[in-house]
Image (tube, rainbow, N blue to C red):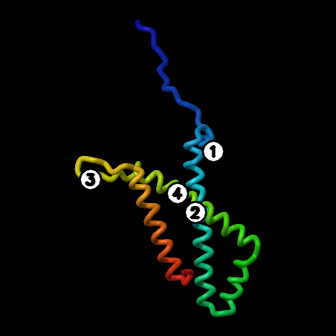
Amino acid sequence: MAEQVNRKPYVREVSPTRWFLRDRRYMRYMAREVTCLFIGAYTLMLLVGIARLAQGPAAYEAFLAALREPASIVFQVLTLGFALYHTTTWFNVTPKALPLQIGEEFVPGGAVAGAHYVLWALISVVILFLAGVF
C-alpha cells in the first residue's frame, strides 16, 4: 500500500490591515482610494451649504462664516490636494484601464492621458470664466 502524502495547499499569510505596506504600488493605490473620504466629506459640506442657502440669507451667511474658520480652510486645502492627487493618478492610469484603439493600432498612453489633462484645463477655464474670474 502506498504511503499517503499530505498535500495541503500553501496559503500565504496576508495581514488584513497592512497588506498594502508591502509594495509602493499598493501604497499609491490605497492613497488614491483614501482620497475619496475627503472628496465625500467635501461633497457633504457643499450639500449643507445648499441647505443653508435654502434656509435664507442669515443661515447662508453663518455657513460662509464657518467656511472662513482656520480648521475649515485647512480641510479645504487638504481636500484640494487630495482631489488633485486622485485626478492626476486616475488620468495616468486611464490608458491602462481603457486602451483606445483606432483601427489596428492603439493610441499611445501619453496621448490619452494628455487629452484628459487638456480637457481638464479647458473645462477649468470655462468654469472660471463663467464664475467671473476672467
Decide if residue 118 is on the left or right side of residue 11: left
**In this rendering, the label closer to the viewer, 2 or 3:** 3
Q: Amino acid at mark 4?
A: Thr
Label drawn at residue 88: 4
Q: CA distance from mark 4 to mark 1?
A: 26 Å
Q: Amino acid at mark 3?
A: Ile
For label 4, the crowd category at 10 Å Cα-Cα, with few meaning under 14, some 14 to 19 and many 20 or more, is: some
**In this rendering, the label closer to the viewer, 1 or 2:** 2
Name the image quarter holding residue 57: bottom right
Dot 4 or dot 3: first in sequence order is 4
Q: CA distance from mark 2 to mark 3?
A: 31 Å
Dot 2 or dot 4: first in sequence order is 2
Dot 1 or dot 3: first in sequence order is 1
Taking 130 as reference, is 1 above or below it? above
- Indicate the secondary structure of the residue bearing disc 4: helix
Question: Percent from the top left, x then y, of residue 127?
Answer: 50, 77
Dot 1 or dot 2: first in sequence order is 1
Question: Percent from the top left, x then y, of residue 69?
Answer: 75, 76
Farthest-out residue, top: 1
Which residue, given by chain and number where applicable, does mark 1 sit on? 17
Q: CA distance from mark 1 to mark 3?
A: 42 Å
Dot 4 or dot 1: first in sequence order is 1
Which residue, given by chain and number where applicable, does mark 2 sit on? 83
- Indicate the secondary structure of the residue bearing disc 3: strand
